[in-house]
Image (cartoon, rainbow, N blue to C red):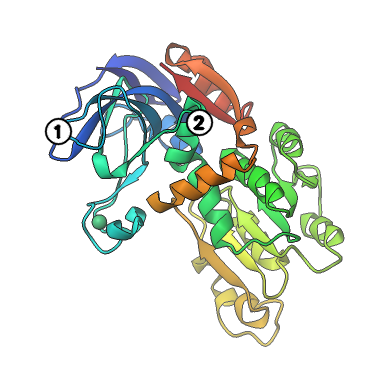
Amino acid sequence: MRGLKFLGNSKIEMSELPDPKLGKGDILVRVKASAICGSEVETYVPPGGVPWGGNPGHEVMGLVEDPNGSTRFHKGDRVGVATVQGCGECFWCRQGKQDFCKKAFVLRNAHSEYVVGKECWMQPVPDDIDDGLAVLISGDGLGVPYGTTIRSGLTAGDTTCIFGTGPVGGAMVIMQTFLGARVIAIDINPLALERATKWGAWKTINPKETKDVKGAILELTNGLGPDKSYEACGNQEMFNLAMEVTIPGGTVMTVGHGTHGIDSVRERLSFHSDPAKGEFWGRNLCVRGNLACHFSDYTDQLAMIRNGLPIRSLITARYPIEQFEEAYRRFMGGQEGKVILTQ
Ligand SMILES: [Zn+2]
Ligand SMILES: [Zn+2]
């Protein structure tokens, strides 16, 4: 089959990839739309290409090509394929929390003619959901921002701070504004902040232009700090700042890919006589992670869209897959929100 091949050094080519093989319970899907994810930068930029060949695409929808004996899906059905797939049988999978499955794996090669997924991790796409939206709610495009926002315990009237407003942070701007929060967007890319404003952010801060970011956040929050903070940039400095500035009793969510962690701020984890230094103890902070979303989140996301969540605006460009060079150049250059490749 035809598909994108990541060569490393920010190079991609259209190539022949091995045809996907169908196992028991698998369904073959002809890809109609796939989204470029911010996590692809990890395989796009470094030299040496992708060890497993092909591409790291994992947000995808399409038409059933071979139902492979399925009684639930038929040839031609529009389906969304979940990004994270599990064994389908364990304690977690049976609850629709396949991302907790010990055998969970992430879909690959979605920027190709075909993908294979397990029948149990596919969702039928209703007619009122276009291909782009179907990609967002089937994979982690909307799923990650949804999971992160919901599991932070966001309530209407909260003031939130989002550190990094790429596609994940950007979708959180849209979702949290929709849910009644006042959002402060923080990013070093002026274009990302412009988009965040369009998506509903209350205020924006660019750390490249603002010397005292912490002071600026406190000034906007009556000196108290945001109720919830969301690290969506994979940057240690911003993660530290999120923990420092969030209101006592508040929540910090960490979702960005990176080498940042709480180990490097060990003293914040332990008792410290100075409450400003013992963040977790002295200020009752809750720090919580979020990698993916649950398969069971799909219906709630669908309901949110039908209730008016304006998430379509997250998609700022759609390119036929043949124009992958332009698509990746603009996405990796921070010039776009979510980018969809169509076939
Ligand atoms: Zn992704
Ligand atoms: Zn499982």
The quarter holding residue 102 reads bottom left
> Up-down: is 154 above or below 335?
below
> In the rendering, at what x and y percent does residue 220 appear?
84, 57
The quarter holding residue 43 reads top left
> Which of the pair 96/169 is nearer the observer?
96
> In the rendering, at what x and y percent does residue 225 appear?
77, 65
Q: CA distance from mark 2 to mark 1?
A: 26 Å
> In the rendering, at what x and y percent does residue 116 appear?
25, 32
Q: Could you tell me which secondary element the residue under label 2 belongs to?
A: loop
Asked if residue 164 shows in the view, the reply is: no
> Up-down: is 62 above or below 158?
above
> Which of the pair 292/303 is nearer the observer?
303
Tell me which amino acid carries mark 1.
Gly
Give the farthest residue toward the top: 322
Quadrant containing the C terminus is top left
Task: Name the quarter showing ligand 2.
Answer: bottom left
> Residue at coordinates 54% horizontally, 50% vertically from top-left?
146
- The label on residue 129 is 2
- Say which residue label 1 marks: 69
Mark 1 C-beta closer than 8 Å to ligand 2: no
> Residue at coordinates 30% horizontally, 26% vertically from top-left?
54
Q: Is residue 157 left or right of residue 79?
A: right
> Up-down: is 34 above or below 186?
above
Tell me which amino acid carries mark 2.
Ile
Contact? badges 2 and 1 (CB < 8 Å): no
> In the rendering, at what x and y percent does residue 294 appear?
41, 53
